[in-house]
Structures are given as C-alpha cells and as structure tokens.
Image (cartoon, rainbow, N blue to C red):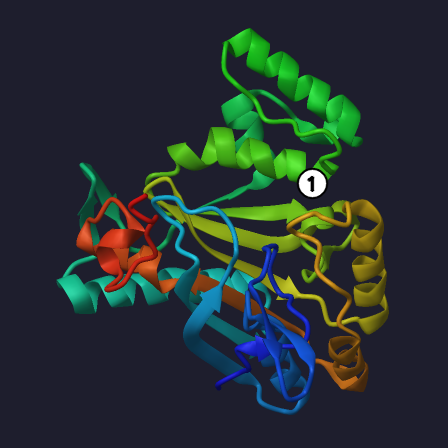
Amino acid sequence: METPILQPLYGGAAARPFTTHHNQLKQELYLRISFELYLKRLLVGGYERVYEIGRDFRNEGVSFKHNPEFTQLEFYAAYWDYNDVMDFTERMVAYVATHVLGTTTITYQGHTISLAPPWNRISMREAILEFTGIDYVDFPEAEPLAKAIQQMGKTRGVATQTPPGASWGKLVDGLLGDFVEPNLIQPTFITQYPRDISPLAKGIPGDPLHVERFEYFIAGMEMGNAFTELNDPQEQQRRFEALQEMYAKDDDELNPIDDDYLRAMRYGMPPNGGFGTGVDRLTMLLTDQPTIREVLLFPHLRERD
C-alpha cells in the first residue's frame, strides 16, 4: 500500500516531524514519521495483511545510524501477536541475507554474526538487570529510579543520563540504550517494554507496567520495532490522553491525538501484529559499512562552513 507522506497529523513513532504548508488549502502539514496509523486504518477496511516500503522523515539528531530521511519497511498482519512477528522477523532477515550474500553468517566491523534462527529472546527487565544490576520494578516511580541510576553510575564510575522530568519509561529505555544495546552483537529480541513509552501496544494481561512489544538488535544497533497492536479504541484514547498529561508541551516525543484514527478503531480493528525496520540499517549490516552515510546515495551532510 502507499500511504500519505503529507499528513495533517503525525504519529506512529516518537519523533519530531518536519513541517510544511499547503498554500491553496491554507493547511499546516507534516512529513510522515511513520506509516503506522494509516496502514492500520487499512486493517479496519478489511485488508488483513498490508505493508509499505518508503521514506520516513524525522527532524532529529544525525549520527552514524540516523539520517533525516530514511527508508522504512512496515507491515501489519491481522490475527498475529508479537510472538508471530518475532518468528517472521528472524526468518525474513535470514532469508534476505541468504539471497544477498549466500549465507546467514556475516562479518560486521570485525564481529562474526549468525543471522540464522532462532534468535535470543530476553525481556527488558532481565536484560537491564543483567547489565546494570538494577531491577527497575523495585522503583515504580521516576524519581526513585533516577536516584538508583545515578547511584549505579557513581559506583561504576560511568556517566548516566537522568534528564529532569523524564518519565519512568524513558528512564528505563535510557538504561537499555546506554548499558544493554552496545552488548547485543548477536541477533536479540528485547521484549516487554514499559507501557508509558509504548502507547500503541497491547498490554500484557495481569502486568500493569509492560506491553507486548519488542525491538530487535544486531551488532549493537537497534534494527526494528514491533508490537501486538492495541485495538481497543477506549483504551487507546486513554493512552493518548495520558501521554498529553505526561509529556511537556515541547517534548519531541509528544504526538497530537489523532481523532480520525480513533474513529477508525471504533468501526472495529482486528487484533494484529505490527513491525517496522530501517532498510538502510539492514543494508549497513549486510555490506559491513560503519555509517548510514555509506549506504545512501545522497546522505544529508553538514554545510562546509
């Protein structure tokens, strides 16, 4: 499917958009940061499996793995959950490697990596406990968790990031990025993410803190993101409203409430699993390139001055 690049509201990811203006209609528009909310509207319309490969645009920092515009693959499959998506993901990446390179064993920046299924699966809680010694469920509020992170940093003599006003889920995610992600060289699914940073994911029954979400990591890089998608419109509205309360008005990750998407959900969205991955990062991996700039024909660069 092809979904709109110019959108009246942006959503489906935690990112700041690029903005533009339609002169004739006198409308402020955004370059999409994700295909998600439009592809899921198509599930409501009766298409049970949909995907799109195309450009996304995010007005955020530039690094060895970020470019302001990049190629993304997203798919959504009715009646799947995130376990089905994990099974599909490891088969898909292994299939691509076999067809591109003739093997599922690759070398990336000096590391020998096997992409053959099955991949390691570990919950976020277990992974953070293993690499930091912090069991974050012992600190269910943001302030005590921030103090525990700062103390851990002092004990280890390492810098920690605990921005003032950061939500509990953002602090947990920061621990993952700083202390766990660099160690995930072999393909690994990190599962069960905090609910407050996963507003579009279905909750885990009996667990008020976590949702059915995973990210997959290879060579110390986050490669993709997936959920069992939330399909309860009342719960989705509560999640959107809670985010508006939680985030500061100028927060990069604050998305507007998309009433049209909620209206679509009320018609009836099937349970489904969704997935997104950066094609450029996968290309980096399979071509053993250290930066995303090496796999883009026209990467965005700083001005000479």
Q: Mark yes or no: residue 78 visible.
A: no
Crowding at dot 1, Cα within 10 Å, few <14 / some 14-19 / many 20+, comes out as many
Residue at point 42%, 63% (across, down): 69
Residue at point 50%, 9% (across, down): 157
Q: State which quadrant residue 149 falls in.
A: top right
160, above or below 69, in the image: above
Query: Viewer-proximal residue, 18 or 148?
Result: 18
190, above or below 275, in the image: above
Q: Dot 1 corresponds to which residue?
A: 169
Q: Is residue 284 left or right of residue 210?
A: left
Residue at point 37%, 53% (across, down): 118
Of the 4 image quadrants, the one containing the C terminus is top left
Q: State which quadrant residue 44 falls in.
A: bottom right
90, above or below 31, in the image: above
Query: Viewer-proximal residue, 303 or 210?
Result: 303
Residue at point 67%, 54% (across, down): 198
